[in-house]
Amino acid sequence: MLRITNDITIEDWELTEQFIRASGPGGQNVNKVSTAVELRFEAARSPNLPGPVKARLKRLAGRRWTKDGAVVIQVDETRSQARNRDIARQRLAELVEKATHKPKRRIPTRPTLGSKKRRLKAKKVRGEVKALRGRVDREE
């Protein structure tokens, strides 16, 4: 069982772990031992996650969200299978915990009168500079 908040926990049956061979350094060991872990959490079917949290999790997960509504986290950072497993569970917990926070609603603001006047004055000055760049008449 993975505890996220006081009211959200992920049961063990919702998680599936698959150990795969990692790429990268490790010598001969890398070809023999499956140290990388692929943690799969069936988020769309989870009864413990509220609807809004699922929607935010889908947006936060991005490419890690599969078509059938699962979050897949792959970890091959260390040579230890147990450590990779802990890192994957920790990342999942952080992701779900981040999805529990409701984003602050943006309140649109209007430009001040002073900023409008400054903008228009700058445009006018720039226009005058450009107007002086015209062709020069050769009157001698």
Image (cartoon, rainbow, N blue to C red):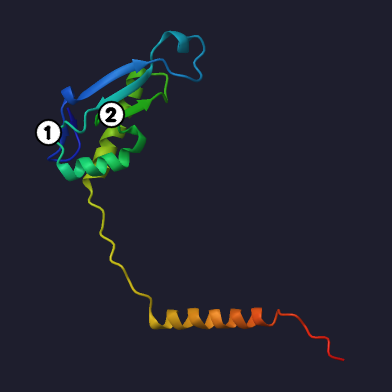
Name which residue type carries label 1. Pro
Quick check: 135 left or right of 107? right
> How many numbered discs, if any?
2
Residue 54 image point, x, y percent: 21, 40
Name which residue type carries label 2. Arg
Residue 47 - label: 1
Residue sitting at x 23%, y 43%: 55
The N terminus is located in which quarter?
top left
Q: Nearer the viewer, residue 110 or 18?
A: 110
Report the Cα–Cα distance between label 2 and label 1: 19 Å
2 vs 1, front mark: 1
Mark 2 surroundings within 10 Å by alpha-carbon count, few (fewer than 14), some (14 through 19), many (20 or more): many
Image quarter of residue 52: top left
16 in relation to 100, above or below:
above
Please identify the residue farthest to the right as the structure is shown. 140
Q: Nearer the viewer, residue 6 or 139?
A: 139
Residue 127 image point, x, y percent: 60, 80
Q: Earlier in the sequence, mark 2 or mark 1?
A: 1
Residue 117 image point, x, y percent: 46, 83
Image quarter of residue 93: top left
Please name the residue that numbered disc 2 is placed on. Answer: 89
104 in relation to 74, above or below:
below
Residue 34 - label: none
